[in-house]
């Protein structure tokens, strides 16, 4: 049996956990691809190097270990790994809002 959380009861211990919420979705954004891993190819020797994306920033390789060239890499978009991302705004259900208070919302 899973626990259904009230939006007002969420706290920092719920960060990075999958929780079940009861609420009303009031806004939905479009689905946007977000790069998780980039693949670069050396323009001289065609060596491919994967590179992680950390905090939305791609670590662009500066030096090719194979042909010893500098700044010869270009990104190969077709080989990069993407995840879908979507922003949603959820509001607590009216029956759980204390009288006289404004409903709590979350941006997910």
Image (cartoon, rainbow, N blue to C red):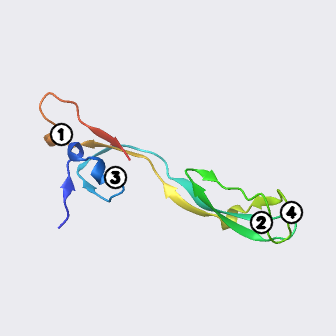
Marks 4 and 2, how far apart in space?
Answer: 12 Å
- Is 49 rendered above or below residue 89? below
On the image, numbered disc 4 is attached to which residue?
A: 69
In percent of width and height, residue 38 lies at 65, 61
Mark seen at residue 41: 2
Marks 2 and 3, how far apart in space?
Answer: 37 Å
In percent of width and height, residue 23 lies at 25, 47
Instruction: Looking at this view, name the residue that lies furthest to the left.
Output: 99
Q: Secondary structure at mark 3?
A: loop
Total marks shown come to 4
Q: Nearer the viewer, mark 2 or mark 3?
A: 3
Which of the marked residues, 2 or 1, is nearer the chain's N terminus? 2
Marks 1 and 4, how far apart in space?
Answer: 63 Å
Marks 4 and 3, how far apart in space?
Answer: 43 Å
| Structural crowding at the residue carrying mark 3, measured as other residues with C-alpha within 10 Å and reported as few (<14), some (14–19) or many (≥20) | few
Which of the marked residues, 1 or 4, is nearer the chain's N terminus? 4
Q: Secondary structure at mark 1?
A: helix
On the image, numbered disc 3 is attached to which residue?
A: 15
């Amino acid at each position: 049996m899973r626990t259904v959380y009230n939006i007002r009861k969420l706290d920092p211990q719920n960060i990075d956990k999958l929780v079940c919420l009861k609420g009303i979705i009031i806004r939905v954004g479009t689905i946007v691809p977000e790069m998780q891993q980039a693949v670069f190819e050396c323009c001289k020797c065609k060596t491919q190097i994967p590179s992680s994306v950390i905090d939305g920033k791609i670590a662009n390789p500066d030096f090719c270990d194979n042909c010893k060239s500098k700044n010869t890499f270009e990104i190969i978009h077709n080989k990069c790994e993407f995840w879908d991302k979507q922003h949603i705004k959820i509001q607590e259900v009216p029956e759980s809002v204390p009288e006289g208070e404004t409903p709590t919302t979350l941006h997910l």
